[in-house]
């Protein structure tokens, strides 16, 4: 029975709730400091029926991962200078500056190098807004590509399931956009993917002529007879026609882009959190002092019980 239900009993003492123990315990989510800047997701595409659903779902994942975070998506202007009803990165940065709000933390929605990044950095510099690195390379991206391959029937879901898949690929071309620099940067994610699949993985750039064909030929020289394409793209940064053309010209089946995969949203959230200003030494000392003062008071309350 709670002490609050006993007449004449002292005021109840708040006790911490029980927490699961062991390695399966869910890690605690870091709290966002009060007054933290918003997360501005920079989308390398104009708003449209293909990009908007992916972006909105990813921001929904971010908010579910980190309560209290303020989010917004900034698109590139379309050909007529508008963002199809959505605000551009430039407009959102200008609005924050005019309202006197902290400059947002800009997170580019790309897994690696991309042609729009230099312009994004130049724009953000005008407002003093920090721009994080691209989302990759990262193990979560390798996980997402693996899942998309398994959904397409091109890979086992995991090593524990040892049944054979007739259409399983024995070699993978990890396709990117952003030129050869993007393909080079995808090498680390490719190594992580190769470890998961136990098949060779070669990176290629969709926007470099001959890159995908050369990668497929290289895999076949290594003995692969059923190579497949695995897009290391989230979606908005890549022209859908490039993906379709690569599959048709190479004659290889292809998995779907990462899209609004759960781990991509988690990666956006963690990238934003890592870019937040660290708690200063004075604030940390004040917090530690408050905990030290609260300790004796709590002990005294328990003793009174």
Image: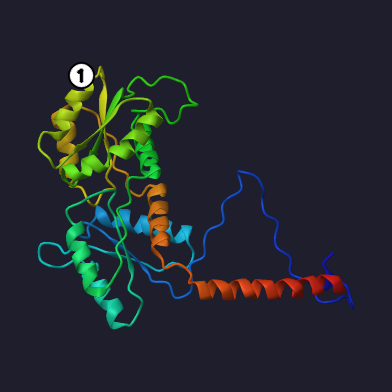
> Disc 1 marks which residue?
221
Closer to the camera in the image, 305 or 181: 181
Q: Is residue 134 above or below residue 249?
A: below
Answer with left or right where residue 164 lies relative to residue 237: right
Q: Residue at x 52, y 65 (%)?
A: 31
- Quarter of the view holding residue 99: bottom left
Label 1 CA crowd tier, 10 Å (few <14, some 14–19, many 20+): few
How is this picture coloured? rainbow
Specify the quadrant that holds the C terminus.
Answer: bottom right
Report the number of discs: 1
Image coordinates of residue 27 in percent, x first then y, are 56, 52
Closer to the camera in the image, 4 or 10: 10
Q: Is residue 167 above or below residue 96?
A: above
- Quarter of the view holding residue 108: bottom left
Q: Is residue 237 visible?
A: yes
Closer to the camera in the image, 242 or 53: 242
Q: Residue at x 30, y 56 (%)?
A: 133
Image coordinates of residue 300 in percent, x first then y, are 81, 74
Q: Residue at x 32, y 39 (%)?
A: 188
Specify the quadrant that holds the N terminus.
Answer: bottom right
Q: Residue furthest right?
A: 8
Answer with left or right where residue 89 lies relative to residue 24: left
Answer with left or right where residue 141 lies relative to residue 182: right
Closer to the camera in the image, 118 or 269: 118
Answer with left or right where residue 240 lies relative to residue 303: left
Image coordinates of residue 235 in percent, x first then y, are 26, 48
Image coordinates of residue 5 in percent, x first then y, are 84, 71
Q: Is residue 176 visible?
A: no
- Quarter of the view holding residue 221: top left
Q: Residue at x 60, y 44 (%)?
A: 24
SS for callout 1: helix
């Amino acid at each position: 029975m709670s002490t609050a239900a006993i007449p004449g009993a002292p005021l109840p003492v708040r006790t911490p709730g029980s927490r699961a123990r062991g390695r399966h315990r869910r890690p605690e989510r870091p709290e966002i400091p009060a007054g933290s800047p918003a997360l501005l997701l920079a989308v390398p595409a104009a708003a449209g029926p293909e990009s908007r659903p992916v972006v909105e779902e990813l921001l929904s994942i971010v908010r579910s991962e980190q309560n209290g975070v303020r989010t917004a998506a900034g698109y590139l202007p379309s050909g007529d200078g508008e963002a199809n009803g959505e605000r551009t990165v430039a407009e959102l940065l200008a609005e924050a500056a005019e309202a006197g709000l902290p400059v947002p933390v800009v997170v580019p929605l790309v897994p690696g190098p991309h042609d729009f990044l230099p312009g994004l950095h130049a724009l953000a510099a005008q407002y003093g807004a920090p721009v994080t690195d691209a989302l990759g390379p990262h193990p979560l991206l390798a996980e997402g590509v693996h899942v998309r391959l398994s959904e397409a029937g091109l890979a086992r879901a995991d090593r524990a399931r040892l049944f054979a898949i007739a259409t399983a690929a024995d070699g993978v071309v990890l396709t990117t956009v952003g030129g050869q620099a993007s393909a080079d940067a995808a090498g680390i994610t490719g190594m992580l993917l190769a470890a998961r699949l136990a098949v060779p993985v070669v990176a290629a750039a969709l926007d470099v002529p001959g890159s995908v064909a050369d990668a497929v030929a290289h895999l076949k020289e290594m003995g692969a007879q059923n190579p497949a394409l695995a897009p290391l793209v989230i979606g908005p940064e890549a022209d859908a026609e490039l993906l379709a053309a690569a599959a048709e010209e190479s004659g290889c089946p292809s998995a779907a882009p990462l899209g609004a995969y759960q781990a991509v949203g988690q990666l956006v959230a963690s990238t934003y959190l890592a870019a937040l200003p660290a708690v200063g030494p004075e604030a940390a000392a004040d917090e530690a002092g408050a905990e030290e003062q609260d300790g004796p008071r709590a002990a005294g309350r328990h003793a009174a019980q």
